[in-house]
Amino acid sequence: MTIDVALREPTPADAEQFHAFAAHPLVLPTVDAAQVPSVEDVRTFLTQLAAQPNSPRKERAIVVGGVVVGSIGLTIEGSEGELGYVVHPDHWGRGVATQAAMLMVHHGFAELGLTRIYAKFSRENPASVRVIQKAGFHQVDETTWEITR
């Protein structure tokens, strides 16, 4: 069974749903968070993101069944983008991150004109490695995977 995954621009109104995964104890070790964010921290981040449409970070909410269950983004530098994502643990192992990655790769190539998208993951995160492999990335070195146009 395939889960219907959609991407959309996040808004400050999504703060509570973003907080549900951003502050989850299973997610925190996988991201570079100095501390557990509050709902207000998340709202401030989303407000700043909305105010900077030309930012090199192209962030999207991952939506399943009308609920924001994660976040995925590309950090753009020239014609390349670095992919990063986070999904609420309740949705791990269901193909959500893989579908979101494939949608974001399409967005990066078709709409942003990128020629290379890469991701960096350690061997301590084998689930993310499987996600990007299923999304069509191939390994470049010890921690980097890429997909090119």
Image (tube, helix red, strand yellow):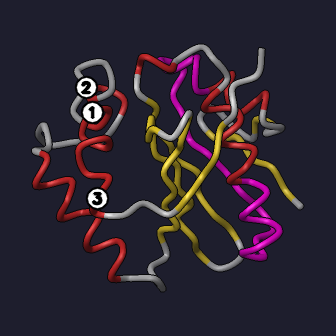
> In the picture shown, does residue 102 fall above or below 52?
above
Report, in whole angstroms, how far the alpha carbon at label 2 lies from the one at label 3: 19 Å
Of marks 1 and 3, which one's residue comes earlier in the chain? 3
The number of numbered badges drawn on the structure is 3
Q: Is residue 91 left or right of residue 45?
A: right
Report, in whole angstroms, how far the alpha carbon at label 1 lies from the one at label 2: 6 Å
SS of the residue under disc 3: helix
Q: Position of residue 69 (x, y in %)?
A: 44, 35
Extreme residue toward the right, this view: 149
Q: Which residue is mark 1?
A: 20
> In the picture shown, does residue 17 fall above or below 51?
above
Report, in whole angstroms, how far the alpha carbon at label 1 lies from the one at label 3: 13 Å
SS of the residue under disc 1: helix
Do residues under tags 1 and 2 come within 8 Å of each other at their CB atoms? Answer: yes
Q: Position of residue 4 (x, y in %)?
A: 69, 33
Of marks 2 and 3, which one's residue comes earlier in the chain? 3
Q: Amino acid at mark 3?
A: Ala
Q: Is residue 53 left or right of residue 11?
A: right
Q: Nearer the viewer, mark 1 or mark 3?
A: 3
Q: Could you say which disc has been placed on residue 24 in the image?
A: 2
Q: Amino acid at mark 1?
A: Ala
Location of the C terminus (image quadrant):
bottom right
Q: Position of residue 28 (x, y in %)?
A: 26, 29
Q: Which residue is mark 3?
A: 13
- Observer-nearest residue: 22 or 3? 3
Q: Which image quadrant for residue 37?
A: top left
**Extent of the magenta region:** 105-128
Residue at 26% across, 71% down: 47
Location of the N terminus (image quadrant):
top right
Q: Position of residue 57 (x, y in %)?
A: 47, 68
